[in-house]
Image (cartoon, rainbow, N blue to C red):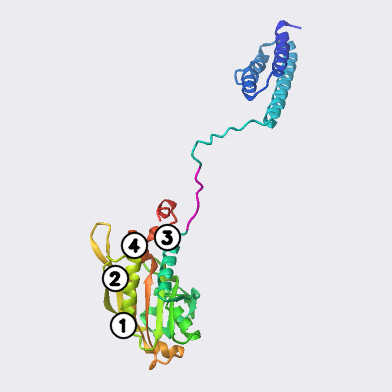
Amino acid sequence: MPEKLKQFEQIRNQALECAKHITDTQALEEFRVEYLGRKGQITRMLSQIGEFSSEQRREAGKLANRAKKDVTQVFNQIKQKLSQKKQPVFVDVTLPGKRPKIGKMHIITQTINELLEIFGRLGFTVAYGPEVEDEWHNFIALNIPIGHPARDSRDNFYIDDNTLLRSQTSTIQIRVMEKQKPPIRVVAPGRVYRPDTVDATHMYMFYQLEALVVDEGISMVDMKTTIDQFIHAFFGPTICWRLRPSFFPFTEPSGEVDVLWSKKDGRDEWMEIGGCGMVDPNVFDAVGIDSEKYTGWAFGFGIERLAMHKYGIKDIRLLFENDLRFLDQF
């Protein structure tokens, strides 16, 4: 056998003998680089086959491929054996632990819970209603007749001629009064839908908190006192707010509540947070409550706007983008 072919056989035998002394992963890696690496002896052996004469090339290829096969096989066997071998795990107990990332409630949910807690202390119970409503509960019973601009299809999300996504939580007032007779003292949180143009203070879907009080002798004084107590409990004693005249079909007289807030440019501006007023007698008549005996008041506040003012949020869209970098602040 030519001397060069003998070298092929010697490299194979040398590798197999070296493999017998491997006891750890570091030695195994050194073995791989020495024999099976890109510049290893087995790799060089394979590249030298073309240097043999045509008569010897077949024998050279046979020896080289045999060497590669045997060495690769023993390498994989040792690798598997070492991987099954239990390695000691050392833990430095003096290092600080990894704090688990625990989820929390969305800022809107936190705000709703705080609002319900405040009104719970004021003696209100909680009511809920469906988000898909019929025209009776969304308009007719609320003294909004056919032809009223509030019923325009461009200002509501109609599903069919008599069904729509509710445009106000006042629908829950009607459902409560249909089932319960005075005295009534209830708040109702929920989502409402209006095709508003989206900007820093408007969204096509938002949350409202509705309140309704019905009893004998209820007046605007009761309403304003309750709103004042709520606003100062939620925002703090230094908050500036105002009640100004307005109009709603289901209340008479009606008003709107504004709070003073700071805009992005640093200027202070009044921001409307909701409407309110004394329940119109026509609404009582629609649900079978004696409007000669009972009076009541109601309001509907935008929950996002309450949260925006309290936490200094300048754009309502941030509340719905689900950016954890923003939500983790609250």
Kindly check if marks 4 and 1 are in contact, taking CB atoms under 8 A apart as contact.
Answer: no
| Mark pair 4, 1: CA separation | 26 Å
Q: Where is residue 276 in the image (x, y as percent from the top left)?
A: 34, 78
Amino acid carrying label 4: it is: Lys
Q: In this view, does 61 lie to the left or right of 323?
A: right
Residue at figure coordinates x 48%, y 56% from the top left: 104
- Residue 82 makes an appearance in the image: yes
Kindly check if marks 1 and 2 are in contact, taking CB atoms under 8 A apart as contact.
Answer: no
Residue at figure coordinates x 75%, y 17% from the top left: 62
Determine if the magenta segment contains residue 99.
yes
Reading the chain from its start, which is encountered first: label 2 or label 4? 2
Q: Mark 4 points at which residue?
A: 310
Q: Is residue 301 left or right of residue 13?
A: left
Q: Name the residue under label 2.
A: 258
Most frequent secondary structure within the magenta stretch: loop
Quick check: 176 above or below 58? below
Task: Count the labels in the image.
Answer: 4
Amino acid carrying label 1: it is: Met
Q: Dot 2 surroundings within 10 Å: few (below 14), some, or many (20 or more)?
A: some
Quick check: 86 above or below 208? above
Q: Mark 3 points at which residue?
A: 107
